[in-house]
Image (spheres, helix red, strand yellow):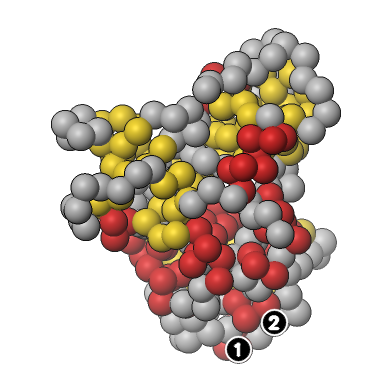
Amino acid sequence: MIVAIPSMVAADSYALVNISTAYVRSKPSHSAELVTQQLMGFPVKIVETQGEWSRVETIDGYDGYIINNTLHAITPQEYGAWKCTPRVIVKSNKELAITNCCGRQVSDVVPGAILVLDDDCGGDTTIVNVLLPDKRKGTLPVDAVMPLEQWRAQPLAIDQVISYGMDNLGAPYLWGGMSPKGMDCSGLTWTAFWLNGRLLKRDASKQALMGAKITDWHCLKAGDLAFFGNPATLRISHVALLRDDDGNIVHSSGGRVRLNSLDPAAPDCISAKFLWGISADNLLPIADDAKASWLFSF
């Protein structure tokens, strides 16, 4: 049953994102700054509504406004049931199409989205049936998804983290973006680790505080995060992902996802000032994160 978002929302009201990428804005207006995005199937807590907009709290700690027609409202009871329902996460590094039985697109979907598993596929082992938050039905290739229980317990696979950035080389830069449609610097690192069962802080300045500071770039290894900013104020303004042990990075900057180096002697050395990095070893699986309660019942 589809539940309409009411004009006045009581405490403990929730919704699931119902499109591939929902825009979270600083104010309830299409012209307001895009501060981040939430992906299909992500739960948000509705704090209040203002006309056609809802002010929401997100799993990664953001407070902003999402237009109501991109959300599917659920009661606390429905939210609790959803946490216990078999679900999958889209583990592909690229945008995909959810299609119906006739091959017609039902929706696009981006890496990291969460979908409910539907009934079996009649013996076809190449696809899985999924339900969108508003109960639309579709299918995805079986190798494009991972059971959510498996996702939350998976070991850190640095090669998979790096492959997300490498597979999206040339993807457009978008302030607040979180997907191959467009991503900012911390959106790239956030999603790369989310696909590997790690929940990062959303902004580069907060990601920079998720581990001990490594001030010598030579000590950074593949999968670590490098941070850049003002050396006088130590204000962080950018983050990049180490793609090897030699200071080479992949990051979203200057209009697109691109490659550069931390090595001052390299011809493609990044112009931004390196301040410090953190080790990927500090990033714990979401199973050990208190925010897991947003997704699972314990």
Sequence-wise, which precedes: disc 1 or disc 2?
Answer: 2
- Disc 1 from disc 2: Cα separation: 7 Å
Dot label at residue 214 = 2
Would you say the residues marked 1 and 2 are in contact, meaning their CB atoms lie under 8 Å apart?
A: yes
Neighbour tally class for label 2: few under 14, some 14-19, many 20 plus, Cα within 10 Å: some
Q: Is residue 47 above or below residue 212?
A: above
Q: Residue at (72%, 11%) from the top-left corner?
A: 7
Q: Residue at (68%, 29%) from the top-left corner?
A: 75
Q: What element carries label 2?
A: loop
Dot label at residue 149 = none
Q: Is residue 132 left or right of residue 29?
A: left
Q: Nearer the viewer, residue 169 or 199?
A: 199
Q: Residue at (69%, 35%) from the top-left corner?
A: 77
In the picture, which quadrant includes the C terminus? Answer: bottom right
Image coordinates for residue 205, horizontal then vertical, percent: 72, 58
Q: Is mark 1 on a helix, strand or loop?
A: helix
Residue 225 appears in which quarter of the rendering? bottom right
Q: In this view, does 131 lie above or below 55?
A: below
Dot label at residue 219 = 1
Q: In this view, does 242 lie to the left or right of 91?
A: right
Q: Which of 79 and 25 is in front in this view?
A: 79
Residue 66 shows up from this direction:
yes
Residue 37 shows up from this direction:
no
Q: As shown in the figure, which amino acid type bears the numbered disc 1? A: Cys
Image coordinates for residue 141, horizontal then vertical, percent: 26, 52
Residue 24 appears in which quarter of the rendering? top right
Q: In this view, does 269 lie above or below 145?
A: below
Image coordinates for residue 214, horizontal then vertical, percent: 69, 82
Q: As shown in the figure, which amino acid type bears the numbered disc 2? A: Ile
